[in-house]
């Protein structure tokens, strides 16, 4: 009796999770013009939804993912999954993004490697895999493709668009490009543009991949190869920037894997073992060309670039109409609090409603994914105000 | 019901004003001003619960340490800057006063009056640092590092070339009655000032 078996299994999932979820695919035949000047003739977007869209279509929330993220933001694909979706701590019944009230849409972005059209997909023009020929996509391209998915799902306006890191950049882009289609935006652990140091780390990651002999200029699939070493190095470098010095120190310190030093170059310190493990896991589950594309999208994002002077970012944000919540984390040195504050100051200069909090956390950039009482409270309070009923009923004036 | 000083401030803020509320707490003042007087603006706060409270009310709040100054706010970008019960906790109240009137044309400031008669008895007769409704902390754990009086503040305004537009007193949850209006430095528990730059 497979049905009752799976029902049993589902009942064992945490009650505050969205339970078992199944990704869906939306196919689009209308060509999508990209910022790079190229056009995607047709494409697929893989997405998941949690909760129920109300009749008015007014309770939808769009979740935008980060560099190595995907559509699986919450719940479980199988009852025996070791881990839930990447933002499971924040999406679910009773959680800040409360799926009892919201209809949550989570998309795998174009260029990704989890089912949406990307380098692993078939290129109809050449008959081979897209591979390195897949056009360099930008945050703006993603937002346009997400808007088309919203059209398809009958969502005229998202009650909120939310995301962390690169996902936060998509939220900003939404507010500027589709100001009428976003009710509020949560920009978490993000930055209005990458610093030279951020780009430098991305370039090290790209060089690690591109200099792997198995990379074959991006045509590794046709050579039955995987640039695993390059991808592993890229992830190791990236991972260092996701953690804080303190988090690494308290997790590993100078602990050794065995009692003695070996005076060699094998794995001796626990932190080495951890990084190698992270790199290995990632290199067997992520596509190298996608990693290159995602880092480029990060590097290119700079809405202020079209304007001059100190108020350039404020000018770029002028079209935005929604209230923003900007959150940073005290130990994040990849996109440190000062970068969020830069965004907040620009929003203030542009007279936009914005709230900002710097969450005290030892976990570095990764903190945006981890449960934290203060983060949950303020994010939840912000999302509460996005509930259709919260905005429809005027509050009683106090006297 | 709001604190007495907040009620007085409410009367002093004109409709549609663009204001900055320094140390805005859970946003009750800005929320009330927004709903009754269509006031816009931002609160600055450092307490996590206060910040979450503001977000829950829909008040725009920025986590910000006032001791870092107001450098990110432009000259004359607000009609009023309000600071309730925070002046005495700042490292340099004089610099903050100057900053407030750089960012806005008018400042509204409230603080506990150290020369209030109960405080005088505490110190002058009993010989202890005052502990009261408006100064609830012990000397060793108080955030209030720059206590002052009506007279002190008026002197600071004079030194900075500021004009005192309005002055009010709060006693407990009420506006002060005639004794405190006549002798605020003795009978006023909370000092409430509205100041402008001399134009």
Image (cartoon, rainbow, N blue to C red):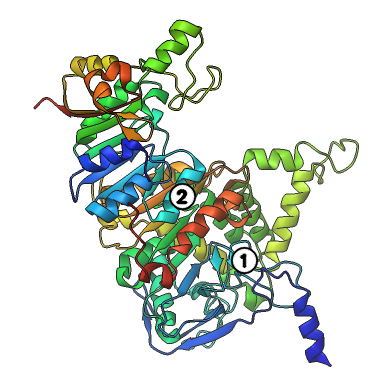
Chain at numbered mark 1: A
Where is mark 1, residue-wise? A215
In the current view of this chain or complex, which residue is farthest to the left? B199
User: How many badges with numbers are in the image?
Assistant: 2
Q: CA distance from mark 2 to mark 1?
A: 52 Å
Judge from the rendering whether residue A45 lies leftward or rightward of residue B13; answer left or right: right
Q: Position of residue A120 (x, y in %)?
A: 58, 78
In the current view of this chain or complex, which residue is farthest to the front? B178
Observer able to see residue A59: yes
Task: Name the mark nearer the viewer: 2 or 1.
Answer: 2
Residue located 41% across and 62% down the image: A185
In the depicted view, which residue is nearer to us: B131 or A287?
Answer: B131
Element carrying mark 2: helix
Residue B53 image label: 2
- Are there few (<14), some (14-19), or many (20+) residues within 10 Å of tag 2? many
Q: Position of residue A246 (x, y in %)?
A: 65, 38
Query: Where, by quadrant of the figure, is residue A76 drawn?
Result: bottom right
CB atoms of marks 2 and 1 within 8 Å: no
Judge from the rendering whether residue B162 lies leftward or rightward of residue B72; answer left or right: left
Task: Relative to A222, say whether A348 is above or below.
Answer: above
Image quadrant for the N terminus of chain A? bottom right
In the depicted view, which residue is nearer to us: A67 or B130?
Answer: B130
Task: Relative to B25, say whether A66 is above or below.
Answer: below
Residue located 42% across and 67% down the image: A390
Task: Relative to B26, say whether A52 is above or below.
Answer: below
- Are there few (<14), some (14-19), or many (20+) residues within 10 Å of tag 1? many
Judge from the rendering whether residue A129 lies leftward or rightward of residue B83; answer left or right: right
Query: Where, by quadrant of the figure, is residue A271 drawn?
Result: top right
Q: Position of residue A12 (x, y in %)?
A: 78, 74
Observer able to see residue A138: no
In the current view of this chain or complex, which residue is farthest to the right? A259
């Amino acid at each position: 009796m497979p049905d009752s078996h799976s029902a049993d299994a589902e009942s064992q999932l945490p009650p505050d999770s969205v339970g078992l979820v199944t990704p869906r695919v939306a196919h689009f035949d209308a060509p999508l013009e990209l910022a790079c000047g190229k056009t995607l003739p047709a494409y697929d977007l893989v997405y998941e939804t949690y909760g129920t869209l109300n009749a008015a279509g007014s309770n939808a929330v769009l979740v935008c993912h980060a560099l190595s993220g995907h559509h699986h933001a919450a719940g479980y694909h199988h009852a025996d999954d070791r881990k839930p979706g990447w933002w499971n701590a924040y999406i679910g019944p009773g959680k800040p993004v409360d799926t009892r009230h919201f209809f949550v849409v989570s998309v795998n972005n174009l260029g990704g490697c989890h089912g949406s059209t990307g380098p692993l997909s078939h290129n109809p023009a050449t008959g081979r895999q897209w591979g390195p020929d897949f056009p360099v996509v930008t945050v703006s391209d993603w937002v346009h493709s997400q808007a088309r998915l919203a059209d398809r799902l009958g969502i005229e306006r998202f009650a909120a668009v939310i995301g962390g890191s690169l996902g936060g950049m998509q939220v900003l882009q939404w507010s500027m490009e589709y100001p009428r289609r976003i009710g509020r935006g949560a920009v978490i652990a993000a930055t209005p543009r990458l610093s030279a140091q951020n780009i430098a780390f991305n370039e090290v990651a790209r060089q690690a991949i591109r200099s792997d002999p198995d990379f074959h200029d991006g045509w590794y699939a046709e050579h039955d190869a995987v640039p695993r070493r390059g991808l592993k190095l890229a992830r190791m470098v990236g991972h260092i920037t996701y953690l804080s010095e303190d988090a690494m120190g308290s997790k590993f310190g100078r602990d050794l894997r065995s009692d003695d030093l070996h005076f060699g170059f094998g794995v001796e310190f626990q932190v080495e073992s951890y990084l190698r493990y992270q790199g290995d896991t990632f290199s067997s589950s992520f596509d190298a060309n996608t990693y290159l594309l995602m880092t480029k999208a990060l590097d290119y994002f700079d809405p202020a670039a079209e304007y001059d002077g100190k108020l350039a970012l404020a000018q770029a944000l002028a079209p935005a109409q929604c209230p923003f919540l900007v959150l940073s984390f005290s130990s994040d040195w990849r996109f440190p609090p000062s970068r969020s504050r830069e965004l907040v100051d620009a929003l203030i200069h542009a007279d936009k409603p914005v709230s900002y909090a710097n969450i005290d956390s030892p976990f570095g950039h990764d903190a945006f994914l981890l449960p934290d009482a203060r983060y949950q409270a303020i994010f939840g309070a912000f999302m509460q105000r996005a509930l259709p009923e919260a905005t429809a009923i005027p509050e009683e004036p106090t006297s | 019901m709001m604190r007495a000083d907040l009620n007085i401030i409410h009367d002093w803020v004109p409709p549609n004003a663009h204001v900055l509320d320094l140390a805005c707490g859970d946003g009750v003042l800005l929320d009330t001003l927004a709903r009754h007087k269509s006031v816009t603006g931002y609160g600055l706060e450092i307490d996590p619960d206060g910040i979450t409270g503001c977000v829950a009310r829909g008040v725009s709040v920025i986590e910000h340490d006032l001791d870092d100054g107001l450098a990110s706010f432009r000259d004359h970008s607000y009609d009023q800057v309000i600071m309730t019960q925070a002046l005495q906790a700042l490292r340099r109240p004089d610099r903050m006063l100057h900053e407030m009137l750089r960012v806005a044309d008018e400042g509204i400031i409230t603080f506990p009056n150290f020369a209030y008669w109960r405080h005088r008895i505490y110190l002058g007769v009993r010989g202890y640092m005052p502990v009261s409704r408006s100064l609830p902390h012990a000397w060793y754990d108080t955030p209030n590092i720059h206590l002052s009086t009506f007279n002190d503040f008026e002197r600071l305004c004079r030194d900075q070339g500021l004009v005192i537009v309005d002055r009010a007193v709060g006693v407990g949850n009420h506006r002060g009655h005639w004794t405190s209006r006549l002798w605020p430095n003795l009978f006023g528990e909370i000092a409430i000032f509205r100041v402008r730059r001399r134009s």
